[in-house]
Amino acid sequence: MWMLAAAVALAAAGCMLRKELVGCAADRDCRLDRVCEGGRCVWPTYPSRLAPAPTIAASSTTTVPVVAGQTQPLAPRPTPAEAGPPGAMFRFGPEHRGRSPYRAPTSRPHILWSMETRGPVTSSPAIAADGSIVVGSHDGELYLVGRDGKPVWRFATGDLVFSSPALVGGGIAYIGSDDDHLYALDLGGRRALWRFRIGSCPQSVGVGPEASRCDVDAGPTVGPDGVIYTGGDAVYAINADGTLRWRFVTGGHVASAPALLPDGTAVAGSQDNLVYAIAPNGTKRWDFRAGDDVESAPAIGEDGTVYVGSDDGKLYALAPTGQLLWAFTTGGDIRASPALGPDGTIYVGAFDALMYAIRRDGTLSWTFRTGDRIVSSALVDAAGTVIFGSQDDRLYALDTEGHPRWSVELGGDVDSSPVLAADGVIYVGSDDRRLYALGPPGR
């Protein structure tokens, strides 16, 4: 009997060790549409999956080799620009509240158009001042799309694009890529301005720890002064001209967009289980330890409260000084960013397929069950309608009491976070490799 018990214990220890060493035990341990094969998270092969980093002709500057933490200038450097319109940045601003000033359709919208890419679209779209849409794809490209759904311009990076674009005044877009670069693009001039190398990982594409540690999945988030915040092997603050302001080292990959407190403190989660608060000069103000990886992008309330989810299945509310206010336990990993309603209600989805509405005191208001995991971050419109996607291939709209207003079936998992235009059109990506525009009935 003791031999059997010892064998079981040894096997369990071996499984734990295998998971630790090789990265996964099941598909749910892998990010988004990675799958677990032989204990490792791997990607399906897309047309541009292994394309080298792009070579772009310089204009008035000389192209130089890119080294860790150095900018490759490709065109005259921009000066800090004003923020773009609502919907021009992930979660609608550096606080990541996910709150739109516009109203979504109250009845079931129909699909106005869809635009096909060559890879899943998990990036959250951004809306430019002229109404065009900018979005990244796992085919390694950034797409500029007209309001009619026709591609206007494409920019190829060297690897998958998880990052959601951030747009600022003057038609400048910032986008990160898993080729370990943050790019600044001039949308009007159809050109790259600069690219900044994140970290010094020996392998910039492919799979494995050294190929993923410096991936630029996080954000970018643009502050009021034009500073760009992103992550990879650390948290980075990058000036609008592409030069490094500071780099804050973390103990794990930073996969989600940093958020900003009113005083300019950057708050970011890491796969070392910590939430970090970093002062404007790049020094640590505080950290908070969760029970597992923190891949949810933080949201900042009007009073400075930090709301952030973790793979330990908890949503945390932290004081601006880092103290725990409360923790709410769900039934699965939380990788979506919380959305904050006008009344302070927090909306967040989890891997248990539930959308949660949580009061400001940390108590449950209601839940709504979908058919699969929720990775998409919710949007709250001007009427309080909550809109989000699920891996059951649907986009949902709920009223403030959690009752369904409508749902629309798309062609694949909806991990992308929706954005809303002033005319009520919703833009969202799907794992079926398409960007969708959904409009009110009668359009």
Image (cartoon, helix red, strand yellow):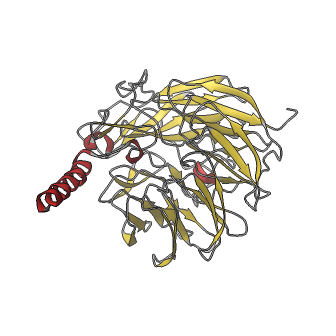
- 69, 105: nearer the viewer: 105
Instruction: Tell me what residue is drawn at x 29 percent, y 59 percent.
Output: 251
**Image mark count:** 0
Instruction: Tell me what residue is drawn at x 82 percent, y 38 percent.
Output: 440
* Outermost residue to the right: 442
On screen, residue 89 versus residue 273, left or right, reads right
* Outermost residue to the top: 47
On screen, residue 32 versus residue 371, left or right, reads left
Residue 60 at x, y percent in the picture: 44, 29
Q: Give the quadrant of the N terminus.
A: bottom left
Residue 300 at x, y percent in the picture: 57, 66
Q: Give the quadrant of the C terminus.
A: top right
- 383, 304: nearer the viewer: 383
Residue 430 at x, y percent in the picture: 58, 35
Residue 392 at x, y percent in the picture: 59, 40
- 419, 65: nearer the viewer: 419
Residue 217 appears in the figure:
yes
Locate residue 418: give its quadrant: top right
- 50, 345: nearer the viewer: 345
On screen, residue 290 versus residue 365, left or right, reads left
Residue 226 appears in the figure:
no
* Outermost residue to the left: 3
On screen, residue 421 versus residue 27, left or right, reads right
Locate residue 357: give its quadrant: bottom right
Instruction: Tell me what residue is drawn at x 40 percent, y 28 percent.
Output: 44
Task: Decide: is 248 above or below 230.
Answer: below
Task: Decide: is 441 above or below 25.
Answer: above
